[in-house]
Amino acid sequence: MSMKSWQNQRGFLFLKEERCKGCGFCIDLCPKKVLRQSEVMNAKGYHPPELYDVEGCIMCDICTEICPDFAIYRYRSKERGKNA
Ligand code: SF4
Ligand code: SF4
């Protein structure tokens, strides 16, 4: 299964492209509007999302919670030595 990932200073966003059913929920509900439909077509014939504004992603987890197919999720980098 192909896995995509993007990284910024806040963490990683992972996407299992083959799980995606192209519903677009993650794109619509991302508060930062940093996801869009990609040109890629997966084996099911759907276009998975892509993170086109990597730095704009705040690793908020909304896409993870909304995805019905557990296709997208984030790993948040831990702050080291800071309370912020
Ligand atoms: S983690 Fe949040 S900001 Fe990043 S793509 Fe998902 S919904 Fe958008
Ligand atoms: S919410 Fe999940 S299934 Fe729907 S487009 Fe996004 S990654 Fe694909």
Image: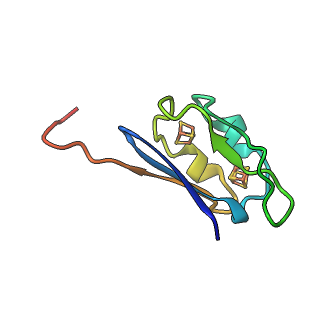
Outermost residue on the left side: it is 81
Q: In the image shown, does 77 or 38 lie closer to the viewer?
A: 38
Outermost residue on the right side: it is 45
Identify the residue at horizontal 23%, vertical 32% (top origin).
84
33 left or right of 82 in image: right
Identify the residue at horizontal 73%, vertical 51% (top origin).
48
Identify the residue at horizontal 87%, vertical 60% (top origin).
45
Tally the marks. 0
Q: Quadrant of residue 10?
A: top left
The color scheme shown is rainbow
Identify the residue at horizontal 74%, vertical 43% (top origin).
38
Image quarter of the N terminus: bottom right
Q: In the image shown, does 8 or 26 lie closer to the viewer?
A: 8
Outermost residue on the bottom side: it is 1
77 left or right of 75 in image: left
> Residue 72: x and y, percent?
60, 55
In the rendered view, tell whether residue 21 sits above or below residue 13. below
> Residue 24: x and y, percent?
76, 44
> Residue 56: x and y, percent?
50, 29
> Residue 66: x and y, percent?
64, 50
82 left or right of 26 in image: left
